[in-house]
Amino acid sequence: MKRKHTLFLIIAAIIATMAGVAMFYSFYVLKEVKTIDMHVKVDNYVGFRLDTDKLYFGTTIPGNDAVRGISVFHNYNYLIKVKIYTAGYISKWVTIDNSSFTLLPNETRKVMFTVHVPEDTPHGNYTGTVKLVFTRW
């Protein structure tokens, strides 16, 4: 009986520790996560799209590149570490000029994204997402 009680206490302590670490990380270290949709249209002409609700690369021809930039900033009074990830269909086509950096308080940084559409890509609309993770540094 005593052995079961000890095992229960050990498991409870492990769960409590894990919960404490998760809460510390989510409330103190992890400050914000922003997700931005990406879109590129592949066709037999080149065109621009300047809407700001997504990261639009416009229309491009298979085998070509399209470049688009975003401004990243924060209003906290301490350093913020920014890590940028891509996901989705076009994530393998996208390169980021700087996917990990630190921002000073009230600093703004321009980040450039380049999408390279492979030569054999059929005409159509292709999408993905960009995730910006802001952590306290």
Image: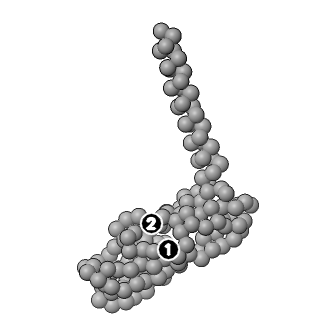
Judged left or right of residue 50, residue 41 is left
Looking at numbered disc 1 in the image, what kind of residue is underneath it?
A: Ile
Judged left or right of residue 65, residue 14 is right
SS at circle 1: strand
Residue found at x 59% / y 40%: 21
Whether residue 29 appears in this view of the structure is yes
Residue found at x 49% / y 13%: 3
Distance from the alpha carbon under mark 2 to that under mark 1: 9 Å
Judged left or right of residue 6, residue 39 is left
Evaluate if marks 2 and 1 touch, with contact meaning CB atoms under 8 Å apart.
Answer: yes
Looking at numbered disc 2 in the image, what kind of residue is underneath it?
A: Thr
Residue found at x 47% / y 82%: 67
Residue positioned most to the front: 3
The image quarter in which residue 14 lies: top right
Figure check: 36 above or below 41: above
Q: Position of residue 121 (x, y in %)?
A: 27, 79
Whether residue 127 appears in this view of the structure is no
| Nearest to the observer: residue 51 or residue 28 | 28
SS at circle 2: strand
Residue positioned most to the right: 77
Label 1, on which residue? 96
Residue found at x 56% / y 42%: 22
The image quarter in which residue 108 lies: bottom right
Label 2, on which residue? 86
Upstream in sequence: badge 2 or badge 1? 2
Q: Position of residue 51 (x, y in %)?
A: 48, 78
Residue positioned most to the bottom: 45
